[in-house]
Amino acid sequence: MTLALGCIADDYTGASDLANTLTRCGLRTVQTIGIPADDLELPEVDAVVVSLKSRSIEPGLAVERSRAAEKWIRGRGASHVLFKICSTFDSTDRGNIGPVMDALRADADEAIVLVTPAFPETGRTVYQGNLFVGSVPLSESPLKDHPLNPMHDSNLVRVLARQSAKTVGLLDLATVARGPDAVRAHLADLITHGFGAAIADAVFARDLETIGAVALEHRVSVGASGLGLGLARALVASGRVKAVATTELSAMAVGGAAACLAGSCSQATLRQIAHAEQTMPVLRLDPERLLAGEGVGPALAWAMDRLGKGPILIASSSTPDQVAAVQARHGRDAAGHAIEQAMADLAEALVQAGVRRLVVAGGETSGAVVDRLGIPGFLVGAEIAAGVPVLRAVGAPAPMLLALKSGNFGGVDFFADALALMR
Ligand code: ADP
């Protein structure tokens, strides 16, 4: 199998977003959790997104991990690698966008890298090198107060120049609007003048398609899910990838028992649990008893009695005042961690008991469950709700379908909607 596109994402949620975007464009896409083992068996896919957690770590370490991911991707035949960053260009003067870009460019023996965090459908546009978040420049957006990487400069040519060893130029909107040939000529000119990167303006999706088409002729690009969309559309338009409907990917049934676990205490999840009570047995865990060390034995016994008859839901979720009371008694982090681990214990035991379709509500809760199940990657399928696809485990001991949702995602019938697509 030869990958048409390899991606390295600097955080997990960004990786999921990109994988979902590529899938919506018709690319069969696997998202891996960390750098996969050399012997990971991939299904037939067009794209792989390797999820790292390298956005805010030491620049040297981010470079090392990104290069290792690139090596794995190139080993699967990908001629183009997208380094996926945040669409708000989250970084500091030390990196990690510039240092990783410099290293990937050197490894690929490229002269110049196209860079754009633009993603117009989510309100991220770039004009004259300045990033806009909705209608305001980046430096006036809430990102100016970000706890890890406050963004005080909207001009990405300057921002990236402070992080990169080479000079950074601009690929302006007027040139992008004239199409791929104009872009190629402009890049050739920048290369002649010694530029090592170009911030590309993009205001409409068609700008990303032009940039994507030219970027594919190079070995590395840097951008957010918007550039992923541009690259994917260019791959499909050129005939290098045959677009596949997402439903085909999740249609293959796995069978087995189905269970839902909810650790999110968001308003949306609380409403979804209340609704699920009309269609499946729901067990509400007592956080105090979990924190007192009771373990998940009683919940598991409850589940065993019911698993053979249809889907079940087990929730730790409580209302804000109950959560506040638990946190006041045990500390926020300790309570959160203990409950996440209880959910992971439950997931592990349920899978051992034959559950093959698992829906998890809560971002941190999902992370704890996926870590515990030791699943190295997912093939991304159809969307249950915006941003929440069905996932088919890749490289796991048993075939499994999962849905992992952050708290606020999905409509009131989310659990039933998810199970309807997971057969
Ligand atoms: P979301 O996506 O809604 O933020 P997360 O799973 O990321 O959901 O976070 C929810 C956090 O709340 C987790 O750390 C979870 O363990 C914790 N939690 C779950 N139930 C309770 C509860 N009843 N009381 C206190 N904390 C809880």
Image (spheres, grey):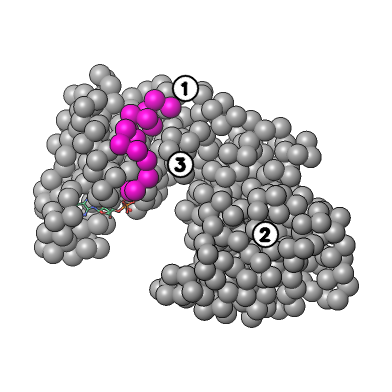
Residue 71: x and y, percent? 68, 55
Mark 2 touches mark 3? (CB < 8 Å): no
Residue at point 46% right, 29% down?
399
Query: In the picture provided, is 142 more to the left or to the right than 320?
Result: right
Q: Which residues are magenta?
A: 407-421
Mark toward the start of the polypeptide (1 vs 3): 1
**Residue position marked by numbered label 1 in the rendering:** 253
Query: In the picture provided, is 398 more to the left or to the right than 208?
Result: left
Q: Is residue 360 magenta?
A: no
**Residue position marked by numbered label 3 in the rendering:** 386
Q: Is residue 346 visible?
A: no
Q: Quadrant of the C terminus?
A: top left
Residue at point 28% right, 21% down?
310
Mark toward the start of the polypeptide (2 vs 3): 2
Gap in angstroms between the C-alphas marked 1 and 3: 22 Å
Q: Is residue 24 visible?
A: yes
Residue at point 43% right, 38% down?
385
Q: Residues within 10 Å of mark 3 (few under 14, many from 20)?
A: few
Foreground pick, 401 / 87: 87
Q: Is residue 420 magenta?
A: yes
Residue depth check, mark 1 versus mark 3: number of the one nearer the observer: 3
